[in-house]
Amino acid sequence: MKLLQHSLVARIVASLLAISAMALVSIVVTMTVAHDSRGDAAAINVAGSLRMNTYQIVAALQRYERHPEPAQRERVEALMSRLETRLASPRLTATLPTAEDHPLREQYRLLVASWHTALAPQVSQAIDEARIQVDPLRQALDSLVADIDRLVWLLERNSESKIQLLSALQILFLILTAVVVAIALYDIRHNLVVPLRQLVVLAREAARRNFDYRTHLTGNDELALLGRTLDGMATELGASYAELEARASRKQRELERSNRAMEVMHDGSRALYGGGNDLCASAAPMLRELEQLLEVGPIRLSLNDPYDDRQIPILATHSPRRPEYCRDHDCHACLIDPVPLRLEQTEQGECVLLPVSVGELMLGTLEVWHPKNQPLTDSVRRLLNALADQLANAIYLQRRIEEQQQVSLMNERAIIARELHDSLAQSLSYLKMQVARLERMQLKEMPRESQAPVFDELRTGLDSAYRQLRELLTTFRLKLEAPGLASALRQTAREFGERLGFSVPLEIDVPPHLLSPNEEIHVLQVVREALANVLKHANAHWTAVSVSFQAARLHVVIEDDGIGLADDSSPPMHYGLVIMRDRADSLGGRLSLHNRPGGGTRVELIFTPQTARLIHQQVTPHPDDATLNADEVADFPHGHRSRG
C-alpha cells in the first residue's frame, strides 16, 4: 500500500494488472460456464422425446389391443426398450448435477421410479393379458408425462440459470473494469496530466527567464517530488539569475568606470609627458578626476631623493596649503578644492601604498586613501597600478630627457673643444712658436732679410687660423632644418652653390642615426674643406657631393671638373689637406685625392662608422683591433645611442 501511495507508476501498473486480471477471470468464467452448459440442449431434447415415446407406447398398446399380433407386441416392447434407453442415456444423465439433493437429480430419480413402478408394470400386464385398463393407464401416463414436463422445465431452468449467471458475471466484471478504469483515469488526470501541465508551464516560464512561477504540487509520487524539486530549482535559479544580473550590472558599471578612467589617463598622458617636470600642472587635474571616478582620495605622490635617501612630497590632491617646494606661485593646481581633505584619516580611511618604479629602479611612492567601508575592487587596484606605472614612466622619461639634454650639451661642448683644439689651437700654437722664433732672431739682431720668412709664415698662419675660425663659426652657426648630417650637408651644398654660382648636386644614401655627433662633424668639415678648395683653386664649373653607406663603410666623394692637381698624386704639404687627413685618421679611415679621367679632382673619404665597428667587434673580435676599438669607444660621446 505504501508503494501505491508513493508511486504513480505503481498505481498505473496496478490498474493495468487489475483490468487484465478481471478480463482474464471473465474469460475463464465464460469458458467454464459455456463448457458446463454444453449438452443442456441435447438433454432437453432427450427429456422431451421421453414424453413422445410415452405417447407412442400407449398408441402401440391400443393397436395391439385391437390386433393382438406378435408384430404389434414387438413394437410395444421396442418402444419400452427405447424409453428405458433414453432414460439411461448419457446425454441426459451427464447434464444432471452431481449433488444428490439437487432438484433436477431428485426429479430424475422420481421420473425413473414412476416409470419403473407405475407405467412399465401396467404396460407389461397389458401386453401379457392383451387387454388395457384405461383409467389406471391414463393416470400413470399423466403422472409420467407430468414428471417428464417437470424434468424438462428443470433442465430449461438449469440452462437458463447458467446463462443468467454468465450474464451477471459479465456485467459484474464490466462494472469492476469500468470502476478500475475510472479510478485510473482520475488518478492519471489529477496526478499525471495536471502536474505535467504545470511542469510544462514551469519549464516554459523558466525558458522565458521568469522564475516566479511555482507548481505547488502535493503528494508523494514521482511527479510531486519532481515538481517540488523544480520549484526549489526555480527559486535557486531566480536568486542566482538576480545575483548574476546584479553582478553583471556591477561589472558593467565597473567596466564603464574603468573605460572612463582609462580615457582620463590617456588624455592626461599628453599633458603628463609633455608638461616637463611640472607634475602639479600636468598630473593634478588627472588625479582629481580619477578620484571622482574611482571614489578614492586623497592621493599623494612622493619621489625619492637619490642624494639624501629620503622621500620628498611632490604632489597632493585636496591640499590645504601650497607645498614648500613649490617653484611657481602663480600655479594653483593644488589649491583649487574648496574643502581640502586630510591624509591622516586613519580612523575613517585606509591607505594603499603603490610603488612608483621602472624595473628595479624605485622612483617614489603613491599613497591612495579610501574609506574603510568601501574596499578597493580588483579593477580599481589594476587602474591604480596602471596610474602608478604611468607616473613612473613619465617621471623616468623626464629624467632621462634631462640627462640626455645634459649629455648632449656636454657632447656639444666636447666637440667644439676638440674642433678648436684640432684646428685653431694648433694654428695658434704654431703661431706662438713662430713668435718665439722671431723674438730670438730680434734678440740676436739678425738682419731683416732673415726675419722675412718668419713674417711670411706668421702671415700665412694667421690667414689659416682666421679661415679655420670662420669655417668653425659657419659650421656651428648652421641653422639646420632637421637634425642629422643630411640636413647639414644640404645646407652646405646650398651655401657653396650660391658662392660658386652654380648648384651643387648632393646624393645621400645613409641609414638614420648611423654616425655619432663627432663623426658627423668630421664628415661635414671634410666636405666643407673640399668645397672651399674647389671655390679657391679649382676654377670649376661643376662639382658634386656623394655620401653613401656600402659594405659597412661610409663613402664620401667630392668631385669637380676644375684644373685638377699638378700630377695624379695628392699634394703632400697643403695645410687644408693636412687637416682633412687628420680628420680621416681620427675617424679610422683614409683620405685619397687624385685627378678624374675627364678632368678635375676627386676627393674620397672612406671609413667604418663607430656603430659598425662595435657590432663587428661583438660578432668577430680581432686582437689587433683592441687598442683601436678602445680608443674609439673613448672618443664615442657619452650617452649617445646610435642605431645602425
Image: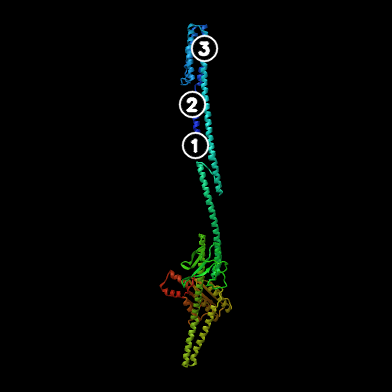
The local crowd at label 3, few if under 14, some if 14 to 19, many if 20 or more residues have their Cα within 10 Å, is many
Can you tell which mark lies on residue 141? 3
On screen, 222 above or below 348? above
User: Which residue has dot 2 on it?
Assistant: 32
**C-alpha gap between disc 2 and disc 1:** 28 Å
Between discs 2 and 1, the one toward the N terminus: 1
**Could you say where residue 441 lies in the image, as x and y percent from the top left?**
47, 91
Depth check: 559 or 1 in front? 1
Secondary element at image label 2: helix
**Coloring scheme used:** rainbow
User: Residue 16 placed where, x, y %?
Assistant: 50, 35
List x then y, in percent, for residue 181: 53, 34
Residue 65 visible (yes or no): yes
Number of residues whose C-alpha sits closer than 10 Å to that of mark 1, classed few (under 14), some (14–19) or many (20 or more):
some
Of badges 3 and 2, nearer the viewer stands 3
User: What number of labels is visible?
Assistant: 3
Q: Does residue 9 sit above or below 157 in this rendering?
A: below
Instruction: State whether residue 78 appears in this view.
Output: no
The disc labelled 3 sits on which kind of residue?
Answer: Leu
Q: Nearer the viewer, residue 318 or 564?
A: 318
Q: Nearer the viewer, mark 2 or mark 1?
A: 1
Q: Secondary structure at mark 1?
A: helix
Query: What separation in Å lies between label 3 and label 1 (alpha carbons)?
Result: 65 Å
Residue type, numbered disc 2: Thr
| Pick the front one: 80 or 452 | 80
Residue situated furthest left in the rendering: 623
The crowding category of the residue bearing disc 2, from other C-alpha atoms within 10 Å (few below 14, some 14 to 19, many at least 20), is few
Residue indicated by mark 1: 13
Sooner in the amino-acid sequence: mark 3 or mark 1: 1
